[in-house]
Amino acid sequence: MATKFELNILGCGSATASLRHFPSCQVLNIRDNLFMIDCGEGAQLQLRKMSLKYARLSNIFISHLHGDHCFGLPGLISTMALLGKTGEITIHTFDAGKRIFGEILDFFCRELPFNVRFNVISPANALIYEDDAITVHAFPLYHRVPTVGFRFTEKPKMRHIRADMAQFHEVPHYEMNNLRMGADFVKPDGTVIPNKELTTDADPCLSYAYCSDTVRSQRVAEAVAGVDWLYHEATYDASLQEKARARGHSTSADAALIAQQAGVKHLILGHFSKRYNDTRQLVNEARQIFPSTVAAEECLTIDLTTPPLI
């Protein structure tokens, strides 16, 4: 059974408020650990609506310091305090974000029951987070202010034990972890049982990349090359290419070209302008270039271990 790797869309609108979309915010659920990416207004409301547990949220990644990507942060931290969350929250943001939000939290949230730690990042390629299961790299995007994307990559997983063969060869319990790590089993009489006879292949390692506000760039395609799933902003349709570039944004066709150039498997469009009553035009344009394209929408959960239904 594959490990959990789910994307929850809390908001996928652009800067101007609308009745259709919340501002940018999403949560990756990786093995029941929650990683928030951007934190637009309404993030705490959407967390409740999607039944995502505050207690499992310990890392928040802010792509850039435009309000539609971070104005939800003070309210979220305040609510988590009122709910009695303990432990630590790490906010990955630029130095200016640490200063600004540090001052806001010091004023409005003086007695937090948990520690808030700021991990200062820069608009450059860098490893910014690592645990036993994943790594997270930041990479530069090209917007009107310093902006980064994030690439989440699972670490290699352990192999699966073939219970029937392990029992047949009388493998002791204390050897099971060695088998999962790929070791052969040596019997007491010296007979070597190859690992491939006792195990099956590990689950594939998944990867997900998040590209918020950015113009189309070959360097972005290189940064997300080969990921299983790519979220890329598609603020406008192709007829508004000049406006998109002038404002530091991409069209749906731009997003599809990045997905194509990067050799990703699946594309998710988001960060939609309020001018669109639905996303069919944007998705159809993208699919002309990159067929495996879907649209983000509020309260949508995408199982990243399986292909999308198109």
Image (cartoon, rainbow, N blue to C red):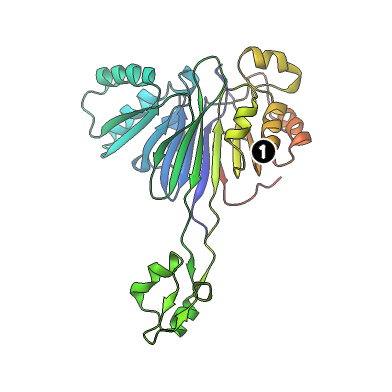
- Between residue 112 and residue 126, name the one nearer to us: 126
Does residue 233 appear in the picture of this structure?
no
On screen, residue 34 versus residue 305, left or right, reads left
Quadrant of the rendering where the C terminus is positioned = top right
The location of residue 228, given as percent across then percent down, is: 60, 45
Residue 207 in the image: state x and y as whole percent: 54, 45
- In the image: residue 295, left or right of residue 183: right
The quarter holding residue 101 reads top left
List x then y, in percent, for residue 86.
26, 39
At x 65%, y 41%, the residue is 264
Q: List x then y, in percent, for residue 114.
A: 25, 34
Q: Nearer the viewer, residue 145 or 106?
A: 145
Q: Depth check: 57 or 91 in front?
A: 91
Residue that label 1 marks: 294
Residue 226, image quadrant: top right
What amino acid is at disc 1? Answer: Val
Residue 88 appearing in the image: yes
Q: Quadrant of residue 54?
A: top left
* Residue lying farthest to the left in this orientation: 111
Q: Nearer the viewer, residue 282 or 261?
A: 261
Q: Residue at x 22, y 34 (%)?
A: 113
Say if 6 sits above or below 71 in the image.
Answer: below
- SS of the residue at dot 1? strand
